[in-house]
Image: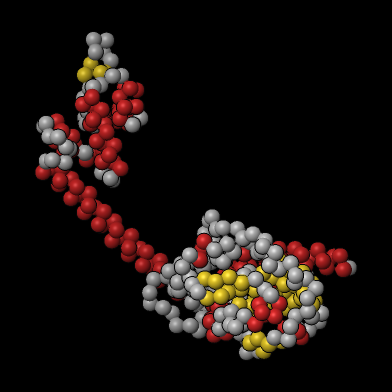
Amino acid sequence: MRIGEAARAAGVTAKAVRYYESLGLIAPGRLANGYRDYDEHDVRLLREVKTLGRLGIPAERTRPFLECLAAGMPHADDCPASLAGYHEAIGELDLRIAELTARRAALAAHLRHAAYRGSSAPQPEGDPVHDPYRLPAGLPVPEDDGGADHLPGRALPPVELPGTAGESIRLDALGPGRTVLYVYPLTGRPDADLPQGWDAIPGARGCTTQACGFRDHHAELVAAGAARVFGLSSQETGYQREVVERLRLPFSMLSDPGLALARELGLPTFEAGGVPLFKRLTMIVLDGAIEHVFYPVFPPDRHAEQVLAWLRKTAGRDA
């Protein structure tokens, strides 16, 4: 066989064949015209080098395995020297794993310190389970199921909810001007598990990044006509207060653990881990009535910008 044929038969490149030959791992015969002549034994050696490479054993250290085949053994790892090669590779992996484990532990500690800096919640000792500050790729996009079509024009009910600033807010008495009321399922913490299958539920993941978006654009929202901004979920006020402190949110979160607002307004909900939760939506409230609804909300980390754009457009139309 010529070099191209041998390379194709072994599943490697011709460049790799030349490299293995330069290491002395294969020694093809020569034809009368001087061309290299590869046979089935050479192809078998090439395949063995490739297989060992996938296991993390570099070509330079495959010689004991190839010599085992050259000695007539049916398998390249039938010789003591081959087994020693396995042991050496495993030992190197153990060292790398230990180094990476130590590095990961250091990074996890820095993550805990940074995530809980300024928070009143006790800093956990365990390893952070997930990263609530970044949305993973490939999240399923929620579809508009019509669950919010009936909301525009509806008056907010006289539901009174506690806020994280210690206040009590009656939703039918929010005051003059526009209120941005964004409703979300639940916020996560770096140290806490989310419900099983959370990322697979369309529209579930992203509450922390959504809150950060409203935080970062809060001044712009106010300048565009938002008299007030509230987040609302079914989580208890104590849990929400920790989130407000940790994320340094300039607005209050409202707690509705009994989902009273869902019952009064017919807000869409879903279940996760056997617990009913609000679906993500945002209501713009003006003079006690729902002026506009964003539903479904996706991606949540860009939602504050969507609300801001709507407020600016509406303010321009009002003017």
The residue under the point 23% across, 10% down is 32
In the image, taking residue 34 as reference, residue 170 lies left or right, namely right
- In terms of image quadrants, where is residue 269? bottom right
- Residue 264, given in percent of the width and then of the height, sits at 70, 80
Q: Is residue 226 visible?
A: no
The residue under the point 64% across, 78% down is 232
Q: Is residue 185 above or below residue 172?
A: above
Q: What is the total number of numbered labels drawn onto the structure image?
A: 0
Which residue is outermost to the top? 32
Residue sitting nearer the eye, 153 or 116: 153
- In terms of image quadrants, where is residue 1? top left
Q: Is residue 259 visible?
A: yes
- Residue 295, given in percent of the width and then of the height, sits at 69, 65
Which residue is outermost to the right? 319
In the image, taking residue 46 as reference, residue 287 lies left or right, namely right
Q: Is residue 30 above or below residue 194?
A: above
- Residue 236, given in percent of the width and then of the height, sits at 56, 83
- Residue 196, given in percent of the width and then of the height, sits at 46, 68
Residue sitting nearer the eye, 5 or 218: 5
The residue under the point 48% across, 83% down is 121
The quadrant of the rendering that contains the C terminus is: bottom right
**Image colouring:** secondary structure
- In terms of image quadrants, where is residue 33? top left
Residue sitting nearer the eye, 305 or 153: 153
